[in-house]
Image (cartoon, helix red, strand yellow):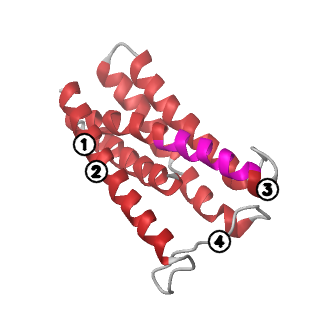
């Protein structure tokens, strides 16, 4: 769910940037529609990671570079949602949230490369475009099935939410 949360943040920042640059309300509504789903995916990643981390590393949480930057991502999502909701003028709220989303996008490469840059508990990538998967085939099939389920959920919820905002 962490990679999916990062992808959704990039999508949210892209829509927010388009809305800021071209002053289009639909783009801002799409960014606002993506934010709750991204926040949920980030929370799921942190929560399930903590449950998985306890038996694996002996602790639910460490101030690891990957975990900390993922927690910052959750705060960025929540900040975006709060900014849009807190400012009564819709246009000003969308602009403020767009700036926050664009600046917050700096965190995405930090999350992605944190495993390579620092001494971290997290292992490297198990799936690569240039090499065979480093996991059992049953796990790979399950992961691909869940990837499809995440995509289906995100599309359905984001477009339904955008339609409700219109």
Q: Is residue 36 left or right of residue 15?
A: right
- Above-or-below relation of 3 to 37: below
Q: Where is mark 1, residue-wise?
A: 156
Residue 111: in magenta span: no
- Pick the front one: 31 or 34: 34
Residue extent of the magenta highlight: 41-54
The location of residue 105, given as percent across then percent down, is: 50, 49
Q: Main secondary structure of the magenta part?
A: helix
Report the disc number at residue 57: 3
- Report if the CB atoms under discs 2 and 1 are less than 8 Å apart: yes
Residue 56 shown left or right of residue 110 in the figure: right
- Quadrant assignment, res 28: top left
Question: In the image, which is nearer the foreground, mark 4 or mark 2?
Answer: 2
Foreground tag (1 vs 3): 3
- C-alpha span from label 4 to label 1: 31 Å
Which of marks 2 and 3 precedes in the sequence? 3
Residue under label 2: 152
Q: Position of residue 1 (x, y in %)?
A: 49, 52
What residue is shown with label 4? 124
The residue sitting at 58% across, 50% down in the picture is 107
């Amino acid at each position: 769910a962490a990679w999916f949360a990062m992808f959704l943040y990039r999508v949210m920042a892209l829509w927010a940037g388009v809305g800021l640059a071209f002053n289009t309300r639909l783009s801002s509504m799409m960014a606002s529609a993506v934010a709750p789903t991204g926040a949920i995916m980030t929370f799921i990643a942190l929560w399930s990671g903590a449950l998985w981390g306890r038996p694996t590393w002996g602790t639910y949480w460490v101030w690891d570079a990957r975990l900390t930057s993922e927690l910052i991502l959750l705060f960025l999502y929540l900040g975006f949602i709060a900014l849009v909701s807190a400012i009564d003028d819709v246009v000003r709220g969308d602009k403020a949230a767009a700036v926050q989303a664009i600046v917050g996008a700096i965190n995405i490469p930090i999350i992605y490369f944190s495993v390579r840059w620092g001494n971290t508990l997290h292992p490297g990538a198990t799936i690569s475009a240039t090499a065979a998967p480093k996991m059992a085939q049953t796990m790979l099939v399950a992961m691909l099935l869940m990837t499809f389920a995440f995509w289906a959920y995100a599309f359905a919820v984001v477009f339904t939410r955008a339609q409700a905002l219109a």
